[in-house]
Amino acid sequence: MGEAKAKRAARREREKLSKRISLSRFNLLAIGTRLSPAPYLYEEVAYWADLEERVIGVIARDNQDNDYYWALLARDRNGRFRSVDINSSLRSADYATVALRERIAKAVTEDDLALLGTQGDETNHPTDLLTVPPGTATKDLHPNFKLLLETPGRAPARAVFRELGPWLAPSDPHFVKEFQSKQFDQRLWELYLWAMLRELSYDVTQPEAPDFHVKAPRSEFTVEATTCAPSEGGVLANHPDPQTPEEMTTFLHNYMPMKFGNALTGKLNKKNASGESYWERGPGVGKPFVIAVADFHKPGGDGEIGSMTYTQEALWLYLYGKRIEWSFVDGSLSVRTVKADDHSYKTKTIETGFFDLPGAENISAVIFSNAGTLAKFDRMGVDAGFAPADHRYYRTGYRLDPDPNAVVGTPFSEEVVADNAESWSDELQVFHNPHAKIPLPFDSFAGTTQHRFEDDTYVCHSYGMPVLSSYTMIMRLVGDEEMQEAVI
């Protein structure tokens, strides 16, 4: 065999040690890796890994020089994929691919992977969201955390939490304990926000307050997270159970604005021991301040849909103190905003229009998503290819209808599969404060659904056909024998 032929054969053997992986899988494995300037510097074109995904790699084109480079990533001592080797100024993507696959082969056959990945700045105790401390009583675990931990169909979500946890650096030492116990929903919402902000190419840190300091070349702001939780006392503890369209309208126009009002005004009015509000604290002073709110006051389960899937209308109404009236004029939809009444439920009344409250001019925007749930983490795990072979995932709901005359969404039902290109920010809603002292730049959440007033006219900007509300169903496939046993 000639020397050139022998080299080609050896290369083919080494190439058997690597495989191509999808963008979705790379995005999860490298969820905290990219720095915020990355999208401006290069364009990623392909992703690779060894067969066991102990190392991963990326091929990218330099936006300025139009040449290519590869980067190899290995797990550091905290379990995070980080860059350990790089080669640049390569003439083509194919040339870079050959070199990267050679480097992957060398890594898994010659390198000490633990030593290769060590960066020297790792913490002694990385955040582990799923490991329950020894001695923890089962009764102290939150029911939804136990579902996450014990249900086979939740394997995709567990894969997401395993990758996300080591990147977190929460200032609250009780974060993991609260996620596993009484504050599961609240901490889940913060985990969703972290992943969503990272997806939008922000560098994210977690100061003592507010919850997130968010920075990128295009924008810098802070975010404080809050949730609507079940009321344990007062008039709101007696939760309505709307059964008719009229009852649902009353529920959304009165009860729910109070729930959102409690969460939002609590953050608006809270001060620390030095008398400082959230927007006066931390590294983001003088930058836009955002409140992120989610509705967990009535979780779903046992076939019941959680309240977060249908309460967004109440948030819009309460924030702006206006309601939408529509009619068809000569076959075209005509929409106008009308000042809303204050919200009354039983013996309680609150003023409408959160953005009109004293001090609210310091709130640049409020963001909301009905997708900060376990179902979202499952779908993102499935998208990255972590679905068990004996499970199927189906999603049913409504998408935005792009027809300018549409007044309801378009129903859809689809199987959730790998590489479905779902994004963390798909369902995000951004409500800009028209009175903000420091407005949030519109491109801070580019690609999401954003609401604002332009010349006193309500305008909603949306991209594509985002999901308005949905329900995710997990099905486990069983054989004939197991099915017969179940029937008997």
Image: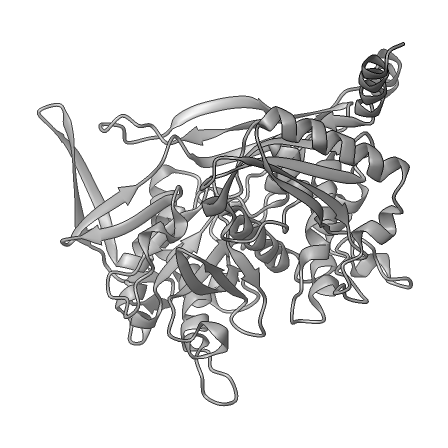
Can residue 386 be seen in the rendering of this structure?
Answer: no
Q: Residue furthest front?
A: 2
Foreground pick, 344 / 192: 192
Q: Is residue 191 left or right of residue 7?
A: left
Residue 277 in percent (x, y) is at: 43, 79
Quadrant in which residue 349 is drawn? bottom left
Q: Residue furthest left?
A: 330
Q: Quadrant of the C terminus?
A: top right
Residue 41 in percent (x, y) is at: 48, 46
Q: Is residue 109 left or right of residue 154?
A: right
Foreground pick, 450 / 16: 16
State how the image is colored.
one colour
Q: Quadrant of the N terminus?
A: top right
Can residue 264 be seen in the rendering of this structure?
Answer: yes
241 lies above or below 230 = above
* Mark count: 0
- Identify the residue at image location x=77%, y=66%: 123
389 lies above or below 407 = above
- Identify the residue at image location x=40%, y=49%: 445
Quadrant in which residue 410 is drawn? top left
Residue 412 in percent (x, y) is at: 47, 23
Q: Residue furthest bottom?
A: 274
Residue 427 in percent (x, y) is at: 46, 41
Q: Is residue 204 left or right of residue 20?
A: left
